[in-house]
Amino acid sequence: CYFEGIFLPVAVWKLPVIQGEIRYFIKEFEEKRGLRELRVLENLNNTIFEANDKILPKCEEVMHGNLNEILKRLQVANQMFHTLQQTEQEESQVTTKLRAAEAQRIADWEGFMKEQHRLKTMVNEEHTKAMEHLKEQYAALEKDLPKQAL
């Protein structure tokens, strides 16, 4: 036998104790619980309608307001980030140019110092040659001096 979704063997239905329990269960469920369950379902239905009619529109309104505010803030933050990124790129370009200019100045300085060393060496050689030439001249004059004194 099948009763309200519960399958029971026929032999069990015929027992008087079981029949009394089944009647009590049906009475308890249909009469007492039925109204209670109906009230719970009605309260739940009212809550759902209230949520759909009042709470959901308010939530949507607040959500859209907050989303618009967040969007504005994100746009400002994005603009600030873009400006910062652009400034950083410009500074990077300037730094690259400065490093290149510094490397060029170092190369120019090294070339200048080599040229100065070469010129110093050349001047020192000329000076040494001039000193030797003067020494030879004075030596020759000293040799001629005793002859002229006579």
Image (cartoon, helix red, strand yellow):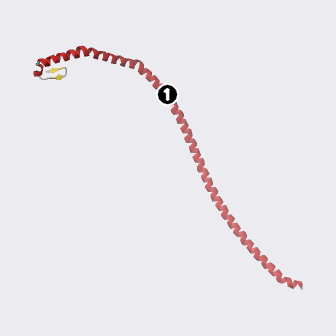
Q: Choose top left, top right, bottom left or bottom right for residue 130.
A: bottom right
Q: Choose top left, top right, bottom left or bottom right for residue 82.
A: top right
Q: Is residue 129 left or right of residue 53?
A: right
For the point 23% across and 15% down, which residue is it?
A: 30
For the point 73% across and 69% down, which residue is it?
A: 123
In the depicted structure, whether residue 83 falls above or below residue 105: above
Q: Is residue 56 left or right of residue 143?
A: left
Residue under pointer 1: 68
Residue 5 in the image, given as x and y percentages of width and height: 19, 22
Residue at the right extreme of this rendering: 150
Q: Is residue 122 left or right of residue 100?
A: right
* Element carrying mark 1: helix
Local packing at callout 1 (Cα closer than 10 Å; few below 14, some 14-19, many 20+) is few
For the point 67% across and 62% down, which residue is it?
A: 113
Of the 4 image quadrants, the one containing the N terminus is top left
Residue 27 in the image, given as x and y percentages of width and height: 20, 14
Q: Relative to the observer, which residue lies in front, 40 or 75? A: 40
Residue 89 in the image, given as x and y percentages of width and height: 56, 44
For the point 17% across and 18% down, which residue is it?
A: 22
In the depicted structure, whether residue 14 falls above or below residue 118: above
Residue at the front extreme of this rendering: 17
- Kind of residue at disc 1: Asn
Of the 4 image quadrants, the one containing the C terminus is bottom right
Q: Relative to the observer, which residue lies in front, 29 or 111? A: 29
Residue 48 in the image, given as x and y percentages of width and height: 36, 19
